[in-house]
Amino acid sequence: MIHSQCRYNPFCERKIDDQGSNFIDCSKTIWANGKKHFGHQYRCILCGLNTGAKVDCATENCVAPGSTKNPCMFHVTCARQAGLEVQPRDSTVKCFEHAGCMYVFRALFEDMMEIELNRNTRKEFRARIPMTWKHASRLLHAAIDIMRTLGWAWRWAEWWVEMGDNWEPFIKEGELEEEMAEQELKIVRSDPGSRCKDARRCRLAAFGAALRNRDYDKDDRDDQEPLERALTAILRTPSLVGPLAKKEIEFFVTWLALAYRSKSPVLGFGNDKCPVADDLFCIHQEDGTPKYELGSRPLPGKTAPLKGAFEPSVQEVDDFLKAPLSADPKKKARKRENTKENDEKMDNVTPPIIGSRRQRYRATKSLPQQGDCREAR
């Protein structure tokens, strides 16, 4: 069976057989055994697995985080779920750093708000206007896209903290950007330090892990008040979602919570989640606990906020602003073991007398010490 992601790989060709049926030629990507792909030695930088077909970032010479030569590669399914830029027509994917402004997390909220504004001619946010089933389905679909992306926040939160995003203000016809104030353009200034504080305060990474495993379904009514508290904390973080009014936040919380409770398989939560690796950048560097599971971390939103929208400070491990791991620790361990075994074998081998001139010299003469280099010459 052909892997479903093969059709997005640029090395795969769409062809037509003698009967006129379309098929995908994967001979350039799949090994002769029919199981492995040519890029099996590289990991998807989202899920951490090296299985299946992967696609490079479309930006030339883009390398994986923490590496100087390994290409930045993705499973297309992982990239789509995490909200990265995917262009199925020309089989291109762009990483978090190089994704266009239309694909950043904040833009998803703007697109959903645009759907709501388009149902009234006044172009003002009025949540209580009756809506059609068609309009409601469009809003639910947009909410599912946002929640699906949030389900991968345990992974991309680190990139957002370090690099920010590529969001750009939307300029309407007749407006001049140079004549508009930052407040009109809805620009939010931030830096890695401030984003790190924001991510910890709204518990962005932990919330992504909780969504992925549907942790809000484990106790009765956790999918209501605790979930809505956690969503409110996310939406009260302007550096992440942009400046939102109170009514807009309430609107998004309502629809995002509905999207979660819909249990749509498109969300990629629970039984529908993508498998991920259990090592390297999928675990915390400090204690080796999985990033994609809450573990001992408390459920975001479970504790009521003392004031405002954010719960009391939680001491939990994260990898924000830490240098990403550049190589697989397992490979390093295997290399050390192999080196040790080879050294032990060499210690037990008697140098041969018969052989080349260099071999006879080493067997009959002892090498000079470091201080005797001149005498040896």
Image (spheres, rainbow, N blue to C red):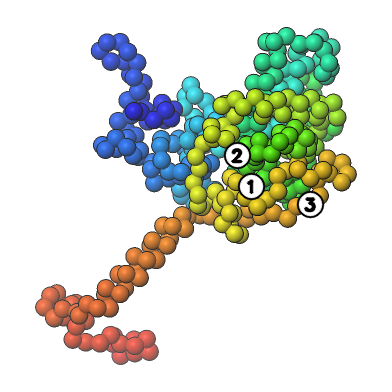
Q: Which residue is mark 3?
A: 313
Image coordinates for residue 186, horizontal then vertical, percent: 80, 31
Position of residue 46 relative to residue 279, above or below, is above
Asked whether, in this view, residue 341 is left or right of residue 198, the answer is left
Number of labels in the image equals 3
Q: Secondary structure at mark 3?
A: loop
Res 247 quadrant in image: top right
Q: Which residue is mark 1?
A: 294
Position of residue 170 relative to residue 227, above or below, is above
Q: Which residue is mark 2?
A: 213
Q: Which quadrant does the N terminus fall into? A: top left
If you read the primary sequence from the N terminus, does the residue marked by circle 2 or circle 1 appear first? Answer: 2
Res 348 quadrant in image: bottom left
- Mark 2 burial class by Cα count in 10 Å: few <14, some 14-19, many 20+: many
The residue at 32%/69% (across/down) is: 341
State whether residue 299 appears in this view. yes
Seen as rendered, the residue at the extreme left is: 354
Asked if disc 1 and disc 3 are in contact, CB closer than 8 Å, the reply is no
If you read the primary sequence from the N terminus, does the residue marked by circle 1 or circle 3 appear first? Answer: 1
Q: CA distance from mark 3 to mark 2?
A: 23 Å
The residue at 79%/52% (across/down) is: 313
- Mark 3 burial class by Cα count in 10 Å: few <14, some 14-19, many 20+: few
What amino acid type should be assigned to the residue bearing mark 2? Answer: Asn
Q: CA distance from mark 1 to mark 3?
A: 16 Å
- Mark 1 burial class by Cα count in 10 Å: few <14, some 14-19, many 20+: many
Q: Secondary structure at mark 2?
A: loop
Image coordinates for residue 163, horizontal then vertical, percent: 65, 44
Asked if disc 2 and disc 1 are in contact, CB closer than 8 Å, the reply is yes
Asked whether, in this view, residue 27 is left or right of residue 196, the answer is left
